[in-house]
Amino acid sequence: MSHIERAPVDQAAGSRLPALEGLRGMMTLLVVLSHFFGELPHGLSALMFGWVAVDMFFVMSGYLIGKLILEKKDHANFFLVFYVRRCLRILPLYVLVTGIVWTLVEMLPAWTDTPVQFPLWSYLSFTQTFFMIDQGSIGAHWLAPTWTLAVEEHFYLVIPAVLVFTPMRRLAGWLIGAALVAVALRAILTGAGPNAEYASLVLLPARADILVLGLLGAVAMVRGVVDWARWMIWLRASPLIALVATFTLQMLTPTPFPVFSPTLVAIGCAGYLLAIVHGAPEAKVYHSPILRFLGTNSYCIYLTHMPVLGLMHGGLLGAAPDLATPVQGLVSLAALPVALLVGWGLTKLVEEPAMHYGRRWRWSDRLVTRQPTHLAPELG
């Protein structure tokens, strides 16, 4: 998620793009609302739209990380600085929150409604997705959102080398090939076994097309070969086109829906993201201070909102979250500001200090050519 990556620098203005921070905030809000009021027993199915936000988070991760790598890859210390900053950006908060939440789940099983619990080391090593596949379960509900971070961590392990060592003129082709492989893998996994559905959802190779669409946007931006004004109307319309195509596919051919729908939704997300980056009129909505607050604190909110909801329901009502009664609905409403407060506090106390330390690791002034000299003209 990652959805945890901050907004990029606007090369023209030399400052952050507030609209992307606000867009991240909107996606964070959609996830929280979906988990608090949609994906619960007796929840409102109309609010179960967190999956769209997760796909947008993946597209944003591909775009932001891809753009960073392509702009910094020729610095001599690229790999060292990249991975040090990634670790400091993600691990301190993740390890702290995961350890505390896992312990709470062990201590309060009646509040968590968790039939299956994975070992702590699986979360800390980002291998919980393999346990999900093996056991056909999301595991502890309070830790379920961490599967997206596992996918992104696996992505971070491989994509820097791919972008650094692949010639630019071949990069788009290789990325499109990887996206097609992901679609084919989902097709193979569909109906392949009782737990194959989990594999198609939580394994990087089966989700690569979503991240790749963000990467392709980054490649187009860095290469500067696209007339964005010419394509703006299509970029702005792409979310609507993708959603209509997705729902049409579901109604007409429900069997291949899990195979192609992630790609269709991701195309819409990528188009919309690029429209926002290039100043589409709707970008003004995401300048909202509330949405930018949510975006700035999105990582901490994302990691903690589920345990906050569970602790509120357990502490006040003595049971796992539900929406069967008005009182349960009121508790869920009360959990919203608490989740935002907890997320803000952890951002200030843990995430921002770790990021500040990470920025001490600076990019070297020495540039290197990592590809054979005869490929040098392909760079840029």
Image: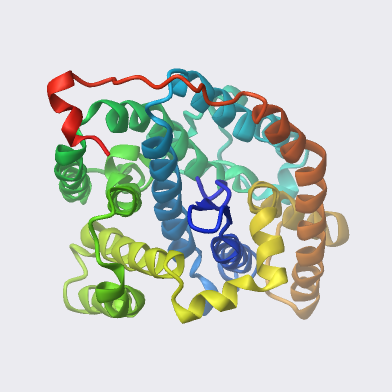
When the figure is inspected, residue 299 is found, relative to residue 264, above or below; the finding is above
Q: Determine if residue 246 is in view.
A: no
As drawn, is 323 to the left or to the right of 367?
right
Q: Position of residue 119 (x, y in %)?
A: 58, 26
How far across and down, in percent of the image, does residue 242 sit?
A: 29, 73
Image position of 193 with respect to 26: above or below: above
166 left or right, relative to 308: left
Above or below, 358 against 2 in this view is above
Residue 348 found in image quarter: top right
Depth check, front residue: 113 or 58: 58
Q: How is the image coloured?
A: rainbow
The picture places residue 21, in percent across and down from the top left corner, at 59, 60
Residue 280, image x and y in percent? Answer: 44, 76
Q: Nearer the viewer, residue 85 or 131?
A: 85
Task: Give residue 254's quadrant in the image.
Answer: bottom left
Above or below for 92 versus 259: above
Q: Which residue sits at x=21%, y=74%?
A: 249
Which quarter of the figure has residue 208? top left
- Please state which of residues 156 and 6 is positioned toward the viewer in this rendering: 6
Which residue is painted at 19% across and 50% down in the image?
A: 183
Point out the residue furthest to the right here: 316
Q: How many labels sit on residues?
A: 0
Determine the residue positioned at 63% across, 63% down. 32
Residue 211 visible in this rendered orientation of the protein: yes
Q: Residue at x 86, y 54 (%)?
A: 315
Give the position of the C terminus as an image quadrant: top left
